Image (tube, grey):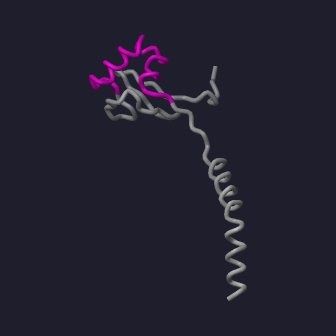
Amino acid sequence: MIRLYRSVQTIIAKLPDLFKLRNSMDESSKPEVETIELDQFLKLAEVCQSGGQAKHLIQSGGVLVNGVIEMRRGKKLRPGDSVSVGGEEFMVGSDTDDIDE
């Protein structure tokens, strides 16, 4: 019984270190994914000149994201997503993508 108590005490004493190790592993194992909001993407792609135009276009159902009508202007887009507007399709890229010239 004394040994069990001592090992439990040892484990309890080491818990803060174990949590620090686990949290640092969780943070480093999550890759950061670049995102852009749909309305910002439409402005960047020069589909719209202003946020107001982007909002109107999105809320009118004129924008497809990955083939589905998207009504949320704050929808987070990730590299590889496709955005279609008026029959024109755009692919979301990343700053780290290689650009073929």
How many numbered callouts? 0
Q: Residue furthest left?
A: 60
Is residue 48 shown above or below 82?
above
Residue 17 on image: x %, y %: 71, 60
* 60 and 80: which is toward the camera: 60
Q: Relative to 1, is 73 on the left or the right?
A: left
Q: Position of residue 7 (x, y in %)?
A: 71, 78
Most distant residue in the top direction:
49
Tell me if residue 1 comes above or below residue 69 in the rendering. below
What residue lies at 46% left-to-right and 23% top-to-bottom?
41
The foreground one among 63 and 9 is 9
Residue 40 coordinates in the image, percent (x, y): 46, 21
3 over 70 or under it: above or below: below
Queried whether the magenta region covers residue 47, the answer comes back as: yes
Q: Name the quadrant of the C terminus.
A: top right
Specify start and end residues of the magenta stretch as a single range: 36-63
Residue 71: quarter of image? top left
* Horizontal side of residue 25 vs 49, given as left or right: right
**Residue situated in front as seen by the camera: 19 or 40:** 19
In the image, 88: left or right of 29? Answer: left
Seen from this angle, which residue lies furthest bottom? 1
Q: Pick the residue in front: 73 or 90.
A: 73
Establish if 12 lies above or below 51: below
Q: What residue lies at 43% left-to-right and 20% top-to-bottom?
A: 42
Location of the N terminus by quadrant is bottom right
Residue beneath the point at 30% across and 23% down: 62
Residue at 40% x, 16% y: name it. 51
> Where's residue 38, x and y in %?
42, 26
